[in-house]
Amino acid sequence: MTDLSHIHRFAPGNRREAASLLLLHGTGGDENDLLPLGEAIAPGATLLSVRGKVLEHGMPRFFRRLAEGVFDEDDVRLRANELADFVAAARERYDLAAPIALGYSNGANIAAAMMLLRPEALAGGILLRAMVPLRVAPQADLAGKPVLIVSGQSDPIIPPSNAAALAAMLTKAGADVQQSVLPVGHQLSQMDLAVAKAWLDSREASISPAVVPAHAGTQ
Ligand code: MLT
């Protein structure tokens, strides 16, 4: 779909009590990439999967970088705000409560930036191979928002210590953060899926459902 500000795919779920997921791919991916992972982590949940608008040598990303792990922070701010505006418009279009972000690598980094810059946009986040997106944390109130950060012990791009710094940043803003470090590298593994699913299952009761409650009884 292209008529909202970002190319995306919307897959309505059949489990009303499940929170919806906002899927954010890694560098070089697109809106199709994480749909199978979203379905596996949250069977029956509504999925909104977005393509990043920035191109790096033809590869879609969510913001510009100057080198691997060195971000153009002005662009991070601009793109995080743009994406938060997209999420607000998509929520209205599809009648959704605030989603949980499920992001991988560059997608996890824009999710973290969005949480810090526009806390209202997301109900929480599953951040796979995330790092600190902004050197100076903006003032944000993330009181009680659940966040899972899953890092790879031997990730050559994102050392677990950087993910730990992100965990500290989000915790300081009030989020309820869990960091899990797996014996893997940057690529996703079956363990990511298992950890993310267990975390989401344990949180489901406290996370708002996909559909805005006021409309929930009318269909
Ligand atoms: C980023 O640019 O967001 C990180 O370096 C991860 C990546 O996309 O490779």
Image: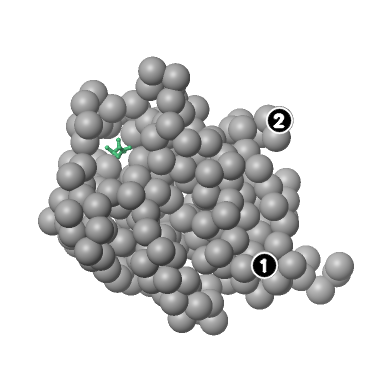
Q: Tell me the kind of residue under disc 1.
A: Gly
Q: CA distance from mark 1 to mark 2?
A: 25 Å
Vertical arrangement, residue 131 with respect to residue 194, above or below: above
Q: Residue at 57% across / 55% down in the picture?
A: 36
Mark positioned earlier in the residue sequence (1 or 2) = 2
Q: Quadrant of the C terminus?
A: bottom right
Vertical arrangement, residue 89 with respect to residue 153, above or below: above
- Residue placed under numbered mark 1 in the picture: 44
| Mark in the foreground, 1 or 2 | 1
Secondary structure type for disc 2: loop
* Quadrant housing residue 32: top right
Residue 151's label in the rendered image is: none
Q: Is residue 16 left or right of residue 54?
A: right
Q: Between 151 and 95, which is closer to the camera in this rendering?
A: 151
* Residue 171 can be seen in this image: no
Vertical arrangement, residue 89 with respect to residue 103, above or below: above
- Residue placed under numbered mark 2 in the picture: 3
Q: Is residue 97 left or right of residue 118?
A: right
Q: Position of residue 190 (x, y in %)?
A: 41, 64
Secondary structure type for disc 1: loop
